[in-house]
Amino acid sequence: MIKIRFHLNKQIFYSLVFFWSGLAAAQIQVSVLDTLPFSLRESSGLAPFGQQWITHNDSGDMPQVYIVERTDTENPRTVIIEGVTHTDWEDIAVDDTYLYIGDFGNNQGSRQNLRIYRVPLAELNANTATAEVIEFAYEDQTDFTPSPDTNFDAEALVSIGNSLFVLTKERGRLGTTAYQIPKTPGQHIAVSVGSYLVNGLVTGAQYDPFTDRLWICGYSSILLPFVALVEEVSVGEFFSGNEQKFSLDTGLAQIEALSIDDTGSLYMTSELFNNTSPPIESLSRLFRFESDFLEEEEEEEEEEEEGENPGESQLEEGDLILFRANGDPFLYYRLETQRPILGLSLYDTNGREIKFTPLERLGNGPIDLSALPPAVYYLSFVLSDGQLTKAFLRPSRF
């Protein structure tokens, strides 16, 4: 249904809420703890360090990591890692003794110098630290021809026991493969121990030894973030346990890193994302959500079965959610704003406005996508003081 509420206070405000009863159960509620400083605008890894976090940028930075407080990142402390290069650092992991830095970003699948740096945790209390090098190559990669659809990019690193596991970011098939590598310095062959067709781009992961759960974060091809959960992780068959995937209520966000604190709460960071046409900005932020959301979700489902409307009032000012059921050519949305709405625009990825519908012509139904060619588009509500925009995919078939 669609609701338009009028508030007469010097001007008319509009609040549009398009509700779909199946949405709330699959979405995790996330809290924004802080906006990261500009020096961490490309935060790509996150790992605990006592009661602080270690993080880093993914490329274009010095070979250094940053130490920040758990919920306040305003004044990061830098630690230079001596004697190493910063080609494309994508994730970090820790055990009781070492920090492991994954220099294995491989956007075109052509790199032959993939490395993980092993840094003693005790040295991170100073301004500089030393590193040993773990070099590796994937056992099943024989072709290093550059390709934008490579399945040998990687942005996630996990520590379990005596091994490290690199999780690939497979642009070709939107899945991930786990490769096992020893923690000892030297040259190694990364051995495949399982794959997961997560239908997204994997950017971070964290193993929780207390619950035997593997948490994975990433985003879709149109920058919609997700978290996946694998129960009962087996080193030999990494993804043999129960797999679940959840969307996040962060809105548009390039989620890049995930970690767990000693209470079981999960934290994520996102990179700064900017687009000029249509105007989209997603800040680099620190997020948190609770690992017990599964139990809470079951309770919410029971309430819904009793006839409650699940979370109609949960949206905050400026929230815009798009969704589409499988096999359905219609795009549904939920928007919450009290700012004056002038109309609705549709853009392609080149920033060209395909259609504009003024407020007085907005109907009470969803948006029919059947006449659009398959592609990525941007839906943008035009407000008196700006725009609220979100990307969506018109699939090749419904």
Image (tube, rainbow, N blue to C red):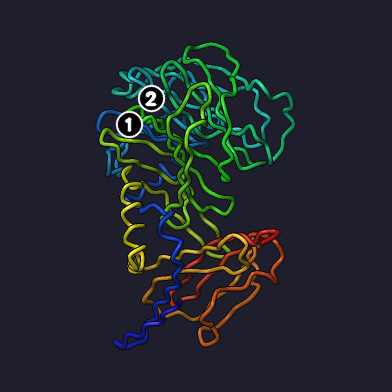
Q: Badge 2, how many Cα within 10 Å: few under 14, some, many 20+?
A: many
Mark drawn on residue 48: 1
Residue shown at 72% from the left, 65% from the top: 373
Three-letter code for the amino acid on which mark 2 is drawn:
Val
Against 223, residue 368 (above or below) is below
Callout 1–callout 2 Cβ contact below 8 Å: yes
Against 100, residue 320 (above or below) is below
Residue shown at 59% from the left, 59% from the top: 326
Residue shown at 57% from the left, 12% from the top: 187
Residue 106: x and y, percent? 61, 33
Residue shown at 69% from the left, 60% from the top: 397
* Residue beneath disc 2: 94
Instruction: Specify which label sits upstream in the sequence, 1 or 2.
Output: 1
Front residue of 21/166: it is 21
- Side (left or right) of 52 relative to 25: left
Which quadrant is home to the N terminus?
Answer: bottom left
Q: Secondary structure at mark 1?
A: strand
- Side (left or right) of 222 relative to 143: left
CA–CA distance between discs 1 and 2? Answer: 8 Å
Q: Number of numbered discs present?
A: 2
